[in-house]
């Protein structure tokens, strides 16, 4: 398969302005065939606008959308092999679950036997077969979401778009649905593009995440890449918690507020930021061989699975195992391992 | 036994006190309706079986004569005149309502899509005719339809009417007058539904390959059905019974049931026959609404 064919979707130089407001600034991104791709960012970052442009519900101001080598920028939603799961699910309240799922097939006048077969198969796939004669208002939030997914998937789209699919679900159900969605995508091999503002959701579901801010994709990579190696302060802070240390280049490392630290490689800047995740800081009673910091425990928060300590100097956040007991005022040795110290580019 | 106190919407009270207060608030309205609507209606039912005296007084001899007369069985054999008038009234109400629906949809979508500031202005423009009496509004059409005005000239030029004549009295003038009078009754309730339209359903229908007709039938019509139904009732029911517009713009050529009733209570002084026609009108209206509900239910709208 050539490189051109393998690229399922290409977004080339897409900008979008609404009057004075710029929602998207020259976005370039390619989404590969069969991957679970997530657009992650805070509200107003342009992620939903980008999704709507791919869906054919919005025209880009400039730029092109290419699906399997074909320019689809000017094709409306009804003529794209792309289907959407809407944030509110947008189920037709006057139609049964079966008729909701059959909607796309009936629009295209599929023979009745095929409509019956495909809708039944898709409802079974999502374990909603028993609900076929109910109406949407008789379903729970989770069930409605399944119907919305079934209604899109029954059309066998090249790409399934999901606009904040979990936002209407409660926290516990959300965690379960995230894993189910991931399994469903692996099983079908359909390209999924999801929009979310929830970093945990993005990490659980995605093959790749594009982090968006202020109309731009600022970093794209696998969940591990964007979480472990954030390139910018925004990504470091948006995905999980991070300790940010202002630093100056000095000798073989950097001089920071917590002392001199050795790094794995030289930063490109003279002055900048170093980031480390709270869970990567090791806490001990004796001085470590490298990057040791003698610190005082200022505050302790119990989180069930772990403790979150606030320590000075810094102040820094440190995550420790639940079985380690500390008291406020304890003096501890921290180790900031060089591989876990991330040099931010901005 | 002491009443057990209950908390009702944050207020400490008892069931008995709540019931008493509810009846207290309800009774003025109930008495009004019973005194001025229910009792007169019952009286009308009785009256419709009575007889007209020689001098137009009511003679309490009960028979089905009035209804027979309405069905066309007169002194000189059967004529379809009254039934024609009833049928024509249903037709006029049906056409007026249908045309109003066709006009109201684009109109309400236009208003709902305006920015909030000018939206209010457009609504005012729609409501302004209500501030004028219906008789005055109808007389205004006399001017607009007079031979000197462009409407009549264009019609004359096209050969639809004779040169130098006015566009009224005619069926056309009645329809124009009725639609312009009743369009706001349909458009305002419809607007309240259109304003709250959930556009994501429209987008979902588009996303699922629906044609324009299908988008309207499945995503827009079901959502606007509540407002549309109120609008249809508010338009259909009064147009069935209207008499001002057909009287002024239709003349003797285009008599509707409203005029017929008015004639019985006015010049003809035949109250029992007027009551019988009123009963027939009421039955016909209820029947029409029933058909609408049936049809509506069968296409999954209501």
Image: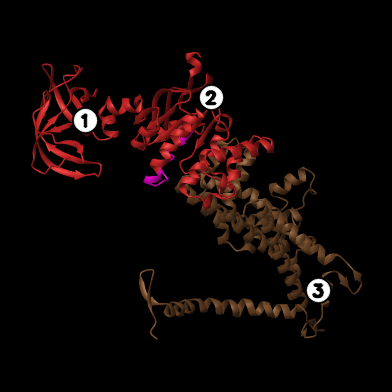
Q: Which mark is residue A280?
A: 1
Q: Residue at x 78, y 79 (%)?
A: B49
Task: Count every numbered label the image shows and give the total.
Answer: 3
Q: Residue at x 81, y 76 (%)?
A: B66
Residue A20 in sight: no
Q: Which mark is residue A72?
A: 2
Which chain is rendered brown in the image? B
Residues at marks 2 and 1 touching, judged by CB atoms closer than 8 Å: no
For disc 3, the marked residue is: B67
- Measured from the top left, where is residue A196 in percent x and y? 39, 36
Tag 2, which chain? A
Q: Nearer the viewer, residue A205 or B18?
A: A205
Q: Are marks 3 and 1 on the same chain?
A: no
Residue A275 in sight: yes
Q: CA distance from mark 3 to mark 1?
A: 95 Å
Q: Give above or below for B173 relative to A112.
A: below
Q: Are marks 2 and 1 on the same chain?
A: yes
Please tell me whether residue A169 belongs to the stretch shown in magenta: yes
Residue B173 in the figure: left or right of residue A189: right
Residue A336 in the figure: left or right of residue B214: left
- Element under label 3? helix
Which chain is rendered red in the image? A
Q: Residues within 10 Å of mark 1 (few under 14, many from 20)?
A: some
- Element under label 2? loop
- Measured from the top left, where is residue B245 in percent x and y? 69, 61
Q: Give above or below for A219 relative to A84.
A: above
Q: Nearer the viewer, residue B257 or B98?
A: B98
Q: Residue at x 25, y 44 (%)?
A: A304
Please tell me whether residue B133 belongs to the stretch shown in magenta: no
Q: Report the magenta residues as a range.
A: A161-173
Nearer to us: label 3 or label 2: 2
- Measured from the top left, where is residue B251 in percent x and y? 76, 62
């Amino acid at each position: 398969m050539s490189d051109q064919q393998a690229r399922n979707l290409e977004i080339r130089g897409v900008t979008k302005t609404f009057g004075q407001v710029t929602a998207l600034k020259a976005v370039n991104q390619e989404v590969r065939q069969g991957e679970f791709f997530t657009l992650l960012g805070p509200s107003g970052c342009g992620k939903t606008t980008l999704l709507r442009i791919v869906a054919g519900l919005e025209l880009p101001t400039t730029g092109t959308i290419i699906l399997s080598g074909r320019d689809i920028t000017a094709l409306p939603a009804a003529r794209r092999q792309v289907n959407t799961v809407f944030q509110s699910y947008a189920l037709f309240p006057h139609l049964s679950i079966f008729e909701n799922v059959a909607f796309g097939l009936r629009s295209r006048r599929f023979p009745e036997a095929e409509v019956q077969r495909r809708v039944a198969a898709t409802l079974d796939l999502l374990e909603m077969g028993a609900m076929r004669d109910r109406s949407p208002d008789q379903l729970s939030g989770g069930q409605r979401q399944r119907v919305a997914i079934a209604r899109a998937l029954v059309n066998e789209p090249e790409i399934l778009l999901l606009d904040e699919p979990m936002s209407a679900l409660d926290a516990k159900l959300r965690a379960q649905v995230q894993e189910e969605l991931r399994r469903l995508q692996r099983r079908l091999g359909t390209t999924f593009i999801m929009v979310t503002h929830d970093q945990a959701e993005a990490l659980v579901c995605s093959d790749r995440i594009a982090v968006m801010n202020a109309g731009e994709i600022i970093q794209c990579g696998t969940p591990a890449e964007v979480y472990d190696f954030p390139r910018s302060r925004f990504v470091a802070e948006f995905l999980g918690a991070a300790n940010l240390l202002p630093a100056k280049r000095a000798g073989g490392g950097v001089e920071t507020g917590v002392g001199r630290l050795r790094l794995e490689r030289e930063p490109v800047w003279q002055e900048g930021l170093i980031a480390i995740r709270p869970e990567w800081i090791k806490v001990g009673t004796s001085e470590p061989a490298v990057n040791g910091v003698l610190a005082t425990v200022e505050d302790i928060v119990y989180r069930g699975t772990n403790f979150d300590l606030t320590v000075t100097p810094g102040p820094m956040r440190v995550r420790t195992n639940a079985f380690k007991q500390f008291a406020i005022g304890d003096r501890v040795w921290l180790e900031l391992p060089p591989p876990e110290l991330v040099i931010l580019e901005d | 036994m002491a009443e057990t106190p209950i908390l009702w919407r944050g207020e400490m009270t008892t069931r008995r006190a709540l019931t008493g207060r509810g009846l207290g608030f309800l009774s003025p309205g109930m008495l009004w309706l019973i005194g001025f609507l229910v009792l007169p209606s019952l009286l009308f039912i009785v009256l419709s079986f009575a007889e007209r005296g020689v001098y137009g007084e009511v003679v309490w001899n009960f028979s089905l004569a009035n209804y027979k007369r309405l069905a066309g069985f007169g002194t000189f054999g059967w004529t379809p005149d009254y039934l024609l008038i009833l049928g024509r009234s249903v037709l006029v109400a049906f056409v007026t309502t249908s045309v109003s629906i066709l006009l109201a949809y684009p109109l309400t979508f236009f208003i709902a899509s305006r920015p909030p500031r000018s939206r209010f202005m457009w609504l005012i423009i729609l409501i302004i005719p209500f501030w004028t009496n219906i008789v005055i509004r109808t007389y205004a059409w006399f001017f607009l339809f007079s031979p000197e005005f462009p409407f009549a000239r264009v019609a004359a030029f096209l050969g639809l009417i004779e040169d130098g004549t006015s566009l009224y009295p005619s069926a056309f003038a009645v329809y124009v007058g009725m639609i312009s009078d009743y369009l706001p009754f349909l458009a305002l309730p419809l607007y309240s539904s259109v304003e709250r339209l959930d556009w994501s359903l429209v987008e979902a229908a588009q996303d699922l390959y629906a044609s324009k007709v299908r988008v309207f039938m499945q995503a827009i019509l079901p959502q606007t059905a509540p407002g549309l139904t109120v609008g249809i009732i508010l338009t259909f029911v009064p147009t069935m019974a209207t008499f001002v517009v057909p009287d002024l713009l239709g003349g003797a050529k285009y008599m509707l049931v409203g005029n017929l009733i008015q004639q019985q209570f006015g010049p003809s002084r035949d109250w029992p026959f007027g009551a019988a026609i009123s009963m027939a009108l009421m039955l016909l209206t209820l029947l029409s609404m029933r058909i609408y509900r049936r049809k509506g239910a069968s296409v999954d709208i209501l």
